[in-house]
Every structure is written in C-alpha cells, then in structure tokens.
Image (cartoon, rainbow, N blue to C red):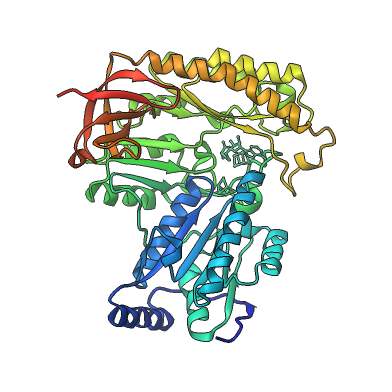
Amino acid sequence: MSKREFTDTNIDAGFDSDKIIELKNKNEQFFILNGRRKSYHILTYGCQMNEHDSEKISGMLTSIGYEETDDEKDAELVIFNTCLIRENAELKFFGKLGEVKGLKRNKPDMMVAVCGCMMQKDEIREKLLKKFSFVDIVFGTNTIHELPGLIYNVEFKNRKSIDIVENTELIYENMPKQRKFKYKALVNITYGCNNFCTYCVVPYVRGREKSREPEEIINEVKSLAQDGCREVTLLGQNVNSYGSNLEIGFTFAQLLREIDKIEGLERIRFMTSHPKDLTDDLISAIKDCSKVCNHIHLPVQAGSNEVLRKMNRKYTREHYLDLIEKLKKEIPDIAITTDIIVGFPGETEEDFLETVDVVRKVQYDSAFTFLYSMREGTKAALMVDQIPDEVKHERFDRLLEVLYPIVLERNSQCIGKTYPVLVESTSKTSENFLTGRTEHFRLVHFKGSEDLIGSTVNVKITNVKTFHMEGEIIN
Ligand code: SAH
Ligand code: SF4
Ligand code: F3S
C-alpha cells in the first residue's frame, strides 16, 4: 500500500452523492466476500455532546454498510471522538492512540480517524499529525457530516483527509443516528456556548451558541416517542439560554411545555442549566410539566464571589443560593446536583471554605467535583496565581469529606420509600440484577428479569450507598 498523504479537503458528503453510492457498493462487496460487514470501533471521551455526536457517527457508518464492534482489534475503522475539557481527558486519549498505533503496525489497512473537540485546536491537531502520522482521517465538531466523504478519499483515492471548520452558523439536521439506548435518548437543543467562563475551552472548540428550531426538536422527540423511547435528555451547554438566536422568539420554558405534551414520552431531562439564566418562568415550567423530572443540574463551580467573578460566571453566591431556595420552595422534592471546581487561580483558603459552605447549605443530591485544570488559550491559564497541585488535592479531599456524607444522607432519606424507576439495562456487576434511575437521577440496582428493560417499575429502596441505591420491585 502506498503511503497516504494528508490533503486539506472540503467535501460535501451529501448522502445521495455518487461517492456515497460507490462507498456503499464497495462495503456491500466486502460483505458478500467475507460474510460479515466491515466493522468500526468508536471510543468516545467527554460529555453527552460527544456521546450524542458518536451516535450520529455510528448512524452514518451504519448507513454506508459498516457495523460496530466492541473490540478495536477486529475493526477495519477505529474512531476517537476526543475531549479536552481537562488535561486528563487529553492524556487518556493519547495513551490509547499509542496502543492503536501498535495495532495498526500489524494491520496496515486499518483506518484510524480522530475527531471531536481536541481536533478544533490548531496546535493539538498539528501535534497529532506530526507525531501520529498513521492517522488517516481528522475532522472536527462542525464537520461530522463529512465523514463518509473523508472515508471515500481514503478508500478510493488512497489519500488522507482532514476537514475542520472553525465556527459555523449552520446546523445539520436529519443526520442518521444510531442511538445507544432504545428507551432513553439524547437530543441536541443548542450547540456551542457564548459564556466564556475563563477556565473553559468549550466556546473555543464548539463555537458560538446556536439553537435548533423548536419544530425540529419537537418532531425529533415525537418520532422517538413513537419508536418507544420513554425518556429524553435535552442537551446544550446552557439550555436556559435556548432560543436567544432564534428569530421567532422561543424560550426554553416554552420548549419544555411543548415537549411535555408529546404522547408516549414519560420523562424529560435537560443538561446543563446556567444559574445566570434560570428564570422564574423556567422554574414554573419544571413545576407544571408532569413529564419534566424534578431534578436540576445547576453547576455552582465555586462559592466565593471573588472566584465566581474571576471565572466570569456572572452570578454571585447570594443569587445562586436564592435560586436554590426558590427551587426548593416551588418544587419541594426537587433533586439538585452540581459541578464544582477546586483550586481555580487565586482561590484562597477562605474562598475554598465558601465553596464548602455552599455545599453544606444546598445539601446536594450529588456533585461532580473537579481539580482546576489549566487549559491553553483560556483566560484563566494566563492568571499568575495558579494554585500548587498539592494544595488543590488537599482541598479536593476536604471537599469530598463534606460532600459524600451529605449525598449519603440524602440517599438515606429514600430508604423505605417506593419510586418509579425507568429500567435501563442489566447490571454489569451482579447477575439477574437490573439498573435504572428515579426521576431524581438516583441510580438504583434491583433484582428483575431482562424483559423489564424499557418499562417503568416501582422499586422500594432497601439500602443506599453514596453512588447508588438498592431496592426491590413492588407490584
Ligand atoms: N456547559 C456546562 C458544562 C461544561 S463542562 C456548564 O456550564 O455547566 C463540565 C464541567 O467541567 C464544568 O461545569 C466545570 O465544572 C468543569 N470544567 C470545565 N473546564 C474545566 C477546567 N479547566 N478545569 C476543571 N474543570 C473544568
Ligand atoms: Fe464552559 Fe461556561 Fe460554556 Fe459551560 S457555560 S461550556 S463552563 S464556558
Ligand atoms: Fe469535552 Fe467537548 Fe464535551 S471538550 S466536555 S467533549 S463539549
């Protein structure tokens, strides 16, 4: 095989184009000759945005005749959908890419594609192309739809292909999607972010915020519900600002009210809510809409006003705590979860204790806690007073010492009570056990048979841990 060279290309991979037909025919021939389809293996890093992008990638690959394999060793195509939110996400990816390099040595025809947020950063992409020259295809978060065209280039022109678009107003609707779960689905409502929190790379790699048209979202959810989907999670970096760029003027609260009417659907979740844009109207919508789960993920990030200011979060601890009070007053059984960053530049011991104080005051049902990670290109990376690693770790440990007992206590309050649980899958750890979630997003393990997957069962909670609960089905 001759060496493939990278060329900068922009291919419009319309699904009916001749190229796609050629590609499909070639894959069909492979199937006839080998008695199996060409297979791909996809590794997804990062958040639900990436998870859902991977479902679109899988949908496209299926439509051109590939099938998925769990084992990268069997795959004709390995795809890395990358994340760079924190340094460890990057390190994990490069470690795995090194392993695949070894695989490709013995299987030179294996195609390797890298996409996702990391590829939107010029320096990282250039480093990748230089150091990992075995990579055949590179594309970004705005060019997922081009993948079939990029594969075509490799297959038919023996040419490596890159397709990156920095920022775009365009939204590609109607991409095929191969969803991981039948009964719960991720649905994009906005793409990108305008908030520029000073620690965060997302606005640089996902571009400016744009909202999908309400009817596109509503139609997608309707067709999901018709296909048997019970729960949707509406996705956006800040769902609360949904609609701000739409000419027709449509808010997130309105969207929730519309989706709530869709027959067959049982649950509506959404991620993520920015405290600065959480309106009274939205709180009313959560309260009024019977399908909207009584759970809100409301990242606080830090409890000190000085740190919040430096983070460019645009709210104060007082405003945040007022919101929590309002939420608890309006919706007494609401579950509140959050994201917290420890060790942001300049964070003093007093600042940190204010974060701990917020955790105590709110009594979170659960929280994702992160050590601040310096990200090149962000404003916070230029701040001079970076916190030493050992201080960050020590504060992080102290935060968990406060947080975990609170979470356990919140879970303990469920013991003896019965909750509807949407059964998601069999348990990975124990045989004959199922797992699912309550509307409050609590994970529950319980005994039951596989044919209950996709249905909602009543589960009485018998025992709780910090990260899950145990129970039994009540008929
Ligand atoms: N748009 C969402 C989530 C973005 S990323 C929001 O605003 O809440 C998910 C979480 O990663 C963030 O909430 C933040 O807590 C964390 N995060 C982002 N950048 C980080 C960084 N540089 N270091 C540590 N944690 C970070
Ligand atoms: Fe990042 Fe802030 Fe946007 Fe969330 S709101 S994606 S933390 S910039
Ligand atoms: Fe990571 Fe991109 Fe999500 S950087 S957290 S995958 S938006």
Residue drawn at point x = 45 percent, y = 22 percent: 466
In this rendering, is residue 187 above or below 365?
Answer: below
The percent coordinates of residue 260 (x first, y second) are 31, 36
Residue drawn at point x = 55 percent, y = 19 percent: 403
The percent coordinates of residue 19 (x first, y second) are 43, 82
Ligand 2 shown in quarter: top right
Q: Quadrant of residue 256?
A: top left
Q: Is residue 289 visible?
A: no
Q: Quadrant of residue 435?
A: top left
Q: Quadrant of the N terminus?
A: bottom right
In this rendering, is residue 424 above or below 443?
Answer: below
Q: Quadrant of the C terminus?
A: top left
Is 213 left or right of 260, judged from the image as shown? Answer: right
Q: How many marks?
A: 0
Q: Is residue 160 visible?
A: yes
The percent coordinates of residue 382 (x first, y second) are 81, 42
In this rendering, is residue 145 above or below 220?
Answer: below
- Residue nearest the observer in this picture, 320 or 254: 320
In this rendering, is residue 137 above or below 365?
Answer: below
- Residue nearest the observer in this picture, 314 or 386: 386
The percent coordinates of residue 432 (x first, y second) are 23, 36
Is 69 left or right of 140, judged from the image as shown? Answer: left
